[in-house]
Amino acid sequence: MARRRQLYEGKAKVLFEGPEPGTLVQYFKDDATAGNGAKSGIITGKGVLNNRISEYLMLKLHEINIPTHFIRRLNMREQLIREVEIIPLEVVVRNVAAGSLAKRLGIPEGTRLPRTIIEYYYKNDALNDPMVSEEHIAAFNWAAPQDMDDMNQLALRTNDFLMGMFTAVGITLVDFKLEFGRIWEGEEMRILLADEISPDNCRLWDSKTNEKLDKDRFRRDMGRVEEAYQEVAKRLGILPESGNGDLKGPEAVQ
């Protein structure tokens, strides 16, 4: 097999040149980080689970006409995606006070917010991804006003859909992070949902007990991280109730 050219390696994923122009192969790692790399470790099977969970959720979003970069899953750890120009913003959608919002504003964690809040963070690890306003985004031309309108609309539609889906399986969607990219089709530019949707970038709590089923278990040294990710996959019907199968999966194919 021909050696693939690696284009980028992030904290949780590796991007390789795709088999066709305009495509990439996204490989999900077991590596876990918190605090922009201040804490790091390995969560066995995380990459396999996140690949499956993200595939499942992206396909469901396709069904309601939310455009994403996802094309298809290739194997246990890899998926084929469209190559997009990533907009350098993290769009955070919050339904319940948790994490930095609770800390910043002194709101007890777990407080239901009076309305869904959208926040923006500038994607820059060296600066610890600072929170920015729409004024900053416009001033530095990170995204045009129409881009912002599209991203906000897609973020809110995604939130409404995922809230319903998770509620149906006994999970509260507390908050989550999205990334978006631009793609050109002829002279027309479109905004697509990119990156992934998984317990790595969503806060997911059991609806009855508020038990955390996401990466906060790693951030806060709560233990049973693998089991939490598996529980999300089981409730979504991705993993059988009886067993977890082989969650190690193959290494990245070069």
Image: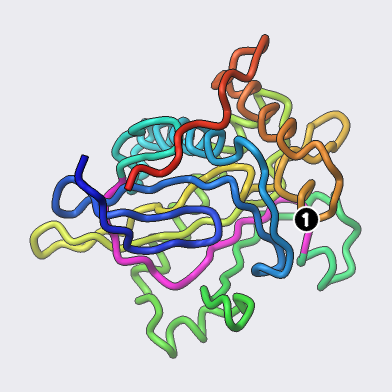
- Colour pattern: rainbow
Residue that lies at the very extreme toward the top in this rendered image: 242
Residue 117 sits in quarter: bottom right
Q: Quadrant for the N terminus, please.
A: top left
Which amino acid does the dot numbered 1 rest on? Answer: Arg
- Residue 161's place in the image compared with 146, above or below, is above
Residue that lies at the very extreme toward the bottom in this rendered image: 139
Residue to which mark 1 is pinned:
219
From the viewer's side, name the closer residue of 201 and 95.
201
Determine the residue positioned at 85% across, 29% down: 208
Q: Where is residue 170? Give x, y as percent.
A: 73, 26
- Residue 231's place in the image compared with 97, above or below, is above
**Left or right of 62 in this view: 156:** right
Number of marks in the image? 1
Determine the residue positioned at 47% across, 60% down: 152
From the viewer's side, name the closer residue of 254 and 118.
254
Q: Where is residue 7? Give x, y as percent.
A: 32, 63
- Magenta extent: 81-99
From the viewer's side, name the closer residue of 207 and 241.
241
> Magenta-highlighted stretch: main secondary structure?
strand
Q: Where is residue 2? Give x, y as percent.
A: 20, 45
Category of crowding for the residue at label 1, using alpha-carbon neighbours closer than 10 angstroms: few (below 14), some (14–19), many (at least 20): some
Element type at mark 1: helix
Residue 64 sits in quarter: top left
